[in-house]
Image (cartoon, rainbow, N blue to C red):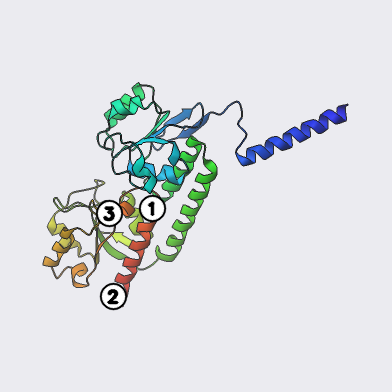
Amino acid sequence: MFKQLNSDFILITQISFFLISLGLYTSAQAEVSVKDDKGNIVTLQQPANRIISLAPHVTESLFAAGAGDKIIGAVNYSDYPEAAKKIPRVGGYPSADLEKIISLKPDLVIAWPSGNNLKQVDKLNAFGIKVFMSEPRYPQDIAKTIQRFGVLAGTSNIANKASNEFLQHYQLLKTNYSKKQKVKVFYQIWNKPIMTINGEHLISKIINLCGGENVFAELKTLTPRISLESVLASNSEVIISGGMGTVRPEWLDEWKKWPALSAVKNKQLHFIDPALMQRVGPRILQGADKLCELLDRARKIRE
């Protein structure tokens, strides 16, 4: 009798482990708990099924984590992947439609501290809505973000795979480019006023990854306004423009007025789609691929 009970117990245990491995077994305690990028512990009674994204990069990372079908609302410009375009809009990331967000009854909202209105985020918290703050500052943080989104959405199998692939891509770029001869880079995000990024910005980390040197890394503001004179004094070897659209901005060629500038003299004025460089999502390594290739071209000019 005892042998039979023991045998049955072993069989049940084996079946349970098998179901867990397939993701088909749920314990009575399905609570998930994750620390966000502001150090807050976000706890859900069960993985989220109704998620609202308040930034385009958040939307992309949720899809990468296998949670795209759980997004019930997203802000404007959440246009990747293609399926994201069909998600109902909840306003823009600087100013979301709180009434609509609350009416959708989300079990999780993912916000972007640098881009969202923090007073609105506080109001969501006051309504008892769980808010996760996403603010990646290093390329590796994007991999961690995808992992954490997988935990929050109950899609860890997909998320962990995507996270590992991202890290492998990152490591390959680091190995191939980060130790190469430095190239002086000016990254321009806007023209009137002239704006760039400092060394704390994720784009600057990508420049470093490619063996570049951000000529304005020492500035204190994350996205500082700078003078024309400071750009000319930097004598950057490569100028990369971002902007707002998918087409090379006309203002990039305005630098041709100063032919003595190294980047102009050597025809190193380049555009990289801001969706690949200025969104802190998984596609940023596609932008890094392009940037690394451009900096290699500049190195060859020196030879």
Q: Residue at x 35, y 41 (%)?
A: 86
In the shown orientation, is residue 167 left or right of residue 1? left
Looking at the rendered image, the disc whose residue lies closer to the viewer, 1 or 2, is 1
Task: Give the percent coordinates (x, y) of residue 196.
Answer: 22, 52
Name the outermost residue toward the top: 127
Disc sitting over residue 229 in the figure: none
Along the line of sight, which residue is nearer the eye, 65 or 112?
65
Left/right of residue 7 with respect to residue 202 in the rendered view = right
Are circles 3 and 2 on residues that touch, CB within 8 Å? Answer: no
Q: Which residue is mark 2?
A: 301
Residue at x 50% of width, y 37% of height: 151
| Circle nearer the N terminus (3, 1) | 3
- Which of the numbered marks, if any, corresponds to residue 217? 3
Identify the image quadrant of the N terminus: top right
Asked if residue 264 is positioned above or below residue 157 in the image, the reply reads below
Location of mark 1 (residue): 283
Report x, y in % for residue 32: 52, 31
Three-letter amino acid code at the position of disc 2: Ile
Q: Along the horizontal axis of the image, is 243 left or right of 146?
A: left
